[in-house]
Image (spheres, rainbow, N blue to C red):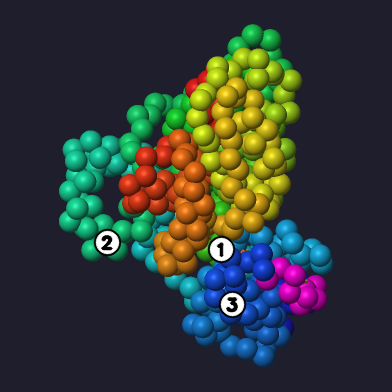
Amino acid sequence: MTDAKKELLSIADSCVKCGICSPHCPTYTHTQNENESPRGRIALIQAWAGGQLNITDNLLNHIDTCLLCRACEKSCPAVVPYAKLIDDFRAQIHEEMPPSMSVKLLKTVAENKRVQRWMKSGLRLYQKNNLQKTARFLRLPSLFGFGKLERLVPDYQETQTLQNYYAAQGETKGDVGLFVGCMGELFDFETVLTTIRVLTHVGFNVHLPENQTCCGALALHEGDAETAQKLASQNQQAFANKNLQAIVTIASGCGSTLKDYAPKVVDISHFLMQTDFDFNKTLKPLRATIRLHTPCSLKNVLKTDKSVLNLLKQIPDAIILPLPETMQCCGAAGSYSLRHGEMAQTLLDELLDVSLEKPTDYLVSSNIGCALHIAAGLRERGENVTVVHPVVLLARQL
Ligand code: SF4
Ligand code: SF4
């Protein structure tokens, strides 16, 4: 038996098969199929690593339908490192699970700055000349196999070249690094600029090392361990030797991957709540109802979800309605919605049904992947709800 298989077995053996995790698992909840539960997936990997089961399409599909939302991990009394088990298994069988065209394209964009620049120019052309409307009307993206990816594309935001360093305004409280993330710069530049503005406003020098790159989550969860490792090393080097108080992230999905290999990683909302800046005295009132979506990566991995609520509560007059604690993954899950559209749509519909029970002006999410997926769902329902990052909403009241 190979060392990799022994390692898989030792993780799988730590599961006592109690099933406490099963009701927390979105795929099990919706299918009631044990093979689609955390316990079932662990048993499948255990049987494969132990030589009792061969790789089949069925087996691969049961593993691939896992969202890696890690709700199971959070509820597990035996603290089974479930995500590591799945990532390690996917790395073992990487060759047997070729990614779809959409996932390949997403990875290429995420991991390559030059491609991102081309993409930015392409998006500008695509949207500014009404090409997007025509293409969507004629269903061209679906015909060419990119429908699920194209539906996520938000309205084009003007960008500018970012500096490597922004100095604090007034008295300096310290230095932080800002992890921008591949999708942030491309699809949510407002959040990037706003975060720099807020951090400098509350007294921090902000460093944006030019050679920072994608966090590697897409590669890691696709089983491409070599690329994930390469990206991790590049980020470690980018943020090293800068005497940083924290590496601040604006997408909890990136933060949850980054924290496994970089020190002092913290979500922006949690970081701001830890500063001594008095937002409540500084912010203008906002008479609006805000639905608060909590990404799985913030709730189950970074575990700083309460900070977002506490931060938004600083806005005078705003009515904050958090989605219920029992709300499951929205279905975005990295590239999941591109591979498993039906389950992703089921989970999204559940979230939107609850979100829209009461009139809502804003839906706030701390993860760009979830925000794009939810915004696409709202667009398709014809709902006029603005999806925005919590820090952007906060900064508009500064
Ligand atoms: S993963 Fe944890 S909670 Fe789930 S069956 Fe195994 S031991 Fe129980
Ligand atoms: S990570 Fe999420 S989808 Fe996967 S088994 Fe755990 S709870 Fe279920």
Residue 215 falls left or right of residue 263 = left
In the image, farthest residue toward the bottom = 52
Per the image, is 339 magenta?
no
Per the image, is 18 magenta?
yes
Residue on which disc 3 sits: 32
For the C terminus, give its image quadrant.
top right
For the N terminus, give its image quadrant.
bottom right
Q: Nearer the viewer, mark 3 or mark 2?
A: 3
- Which dot marks residue 67? 1
Q: Residue at x 62, y 50 (%)?
A: 324
Decide if residue 376 is in sight here. no
Mark 1 sits near ligand 2, with its Cβ under 8 Å away: yes
Q: Quadrant of residue 89?
A: bottom right
Residue 141 falls left or right of residue 193 = left
How many other residues sit within 10 Å of disc 1, few (<14), some (14-19) or many (≥20)? Answer: many
| Pointer 1 or 2: first along the chain | 1
Compute the Cα span from label 3 to label 2. 31 Å
96 and 326: which is toward the camera: 326
Tags 1 and 3 in contact by the CB under 8 Å rule?
no
51 and 349: which is toward the camera: 349
Q: Nearer the viewer, mark 1 or mark 3?
A: 3
Q: Is residue 383 above or below residue 220?
A: above
- Looking at the rendering, the stretch of residues picked out in magenta corresponds to 14-22
Residue type marked 1: Leu
Which secondary structure class fits the magenta region best? Answer: loop
Residue 286: horizontal and vertical position, in percent? 52, 23
Compute the Cα span from label 1 to label 3. 16 Å
Residue 121 falls left or right of residue 277 = left
| Pointer 1 or 3: first along the chain | 3
Circle 1 SS class = loop
Residue type marked 3: Gln
